[in-house]
Amino acid sequence: MNKPPRILVLGTGGTIAGAAGSATDAAYRPGGLALEVLVGHLAALGLVAEIVPQEVARIGSQDIGFAEWQALHAACAGALGDPAIDGVIITHGTDTAEETGFLLDLTLPTTKPVVLVGAMRPADAVGADGMRNFANAVKVASEPAAAGRGVMLVMGDAVLAARDARKAATSAIDAFRSFPRGPLARVTPAGIDWFGPPHRPKQQARYPFPQALPRVAILTAGAGMDEKPVEALLGIGCRGVVLAGMGQGNAPASVIAALSEAARSGIPVVRSTRVDEGLVDRNVEVDDDGQGLVAARALGPARARVLLMVLIANGICDAAAVQAAFDGA
Ligand code: ASP
C-alpha cells in the first residue's frame, strides 16, 4: 500500500480558528482555537493524509507582520527541502491572506504545493466553512499535480493563484476573486479539476526572502485632496509609495507632481488603483515615462506594496527595473 501524503500544517489563527462561543453571535475571536483542535476536527473527516501540525501564531491576520512572515518562510523552505514532507498548508486569516500568499509566492521555489486556507465564518458558527476549506486544502496539498503553480489559496471549492487572488467581500462566504487570470482549479467530491498545466514547474524562488522590510505606504487618492499626504509619508521615512489611485491609477495633478518629485529623489512610486479590479497600464492619463512612475498592471494596492517591499529590500529601486518586475508578476 502507498504511504499517505505527509502534509505540514502551519497554523497562524484567523477566522478558520475563530471561536464565537455561540453559534449565532456576530462577535468572535480570530485564532481562539489552537491548531491541535482544528487538526482534531480534520482527523474526524477521514482524509487520507498524515498531518504534521506546527503552530506559528494564533492571531487575526490583521496583526500579521514580518516576524510571522519570516517564521512561515523558514518553515516552508525547510519543508520544501525535506523529502519526508509532500506539501504545506498554512491556516490563515482572510484579511491579509493576499499579502502573505504573494510574499511567499515571490520568495519560495515551486517544487511542492504550498496552500493557504482560511474561512469566512468562525469554527462554531452555523454553516461554518472552515472544515470544508481545510479538507479541500489537504486534497490540493496532497496532489503532486498541484506543484509548479506558485503559492495557492483554497477558499470555497476554488483554488486561486496567490499572484491573482484578492479579498473582494467583507463577509460573504465567496469572498475571493482572481484577476487577471481565473481560478487554477475547482475541488469536487471526486477530485481536483485543473484548468491548465503548471505555469511555473520546478522554479527557484524569484527573490531572496528579505532580512527586513522597508516602510512602504499605500496612499489612497480622493477627490479634492492635495499633495500634503505625500509630503507626510516622505516625512516619516517611507522608502516607497503605492498609489491606490482613481480609475487607471489617477490622482489630482498636485499629487502626481509630488509623487513624481519623490520618484526623482529615488523613492520608487507605483500607481495602482482603488478600483476593485482592472489593469493600470503605463502612460494612459499619467505620463509615467516623463514622471518616473511605475504602473502596477494587474496588482491591487496590497499586493503591489508586497512586491515593492521585496524589490526595495533586494536593492531594486530604479523605475525601469521596478516596472519590469511588475510586468512579470
Ligand atoms: N480578521 C480575520 C483575519 O484575517 C478575518 C478572517 O480570517 O476571515 O484573521
Image: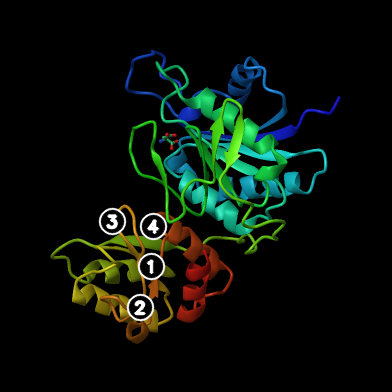
Q: Do the residues under discs 1 and 3 have CB atoms within 8 angstroms?
A: no
The x, y position of residue 109, in whole percent, is 69, 55
Q: What mark, if any, has residue 275 been given in the picture?
A: 3
Q: Residues within 10 Å of mark 1 (few under 14, many from 20)?
A: many
Q: Is residue 139 visible?
A: yes
What residue sits right under mark 1 in the picture? 241
- Residue 17 as seen in the image, left or right of residue 256: right
Percent position of residue 272, x then y:
35, 64
- The mark nearer the N terminus, 2 or 4, is 2
Q: Is residue 168 above or below residue 8?
A: below
Residue bearing the label numbered 4 = 300
Labels 4 and 1: the sequence-earlier one: 1
Q: First in sequence, mark 1 or 3: give its number.
A: 1
State left or right for residue 255 relative to residue 322. left
Of the residues shown, which amino acid type is indicated by label 4? Answer: Gly
- Distance from disc 4 to disc 1, alpha carbons, whole Å, reads 13 Å
Residue 262, numbered label: 2
Confirm or reject: label 3 Cβ below 8 Å from ligand 1. no
Is residue 237 shown to the viewer in this render?
no
Within 10 Å of disc 2 (Cα), the crowding (few <14, some 14-19, many 20+) is many
Q: Nearer the viewer, mark 4 or mark 1?
A: 4
SS type, badge 2: helix
**Which residue appears farthest toward the bottom when viewing the image?**
290
Residue shown at the point (28%, 56%) measured from the top left: 275
Could you tell which of marks 2 and 1 lies nearer the N-terminus?
A: 1
Disc 3 and disc 2: Cα gap in Å? Answer: 24 Å
Residue 11 tag number = none
Q: Amino acid at mark 2?
A: Ala
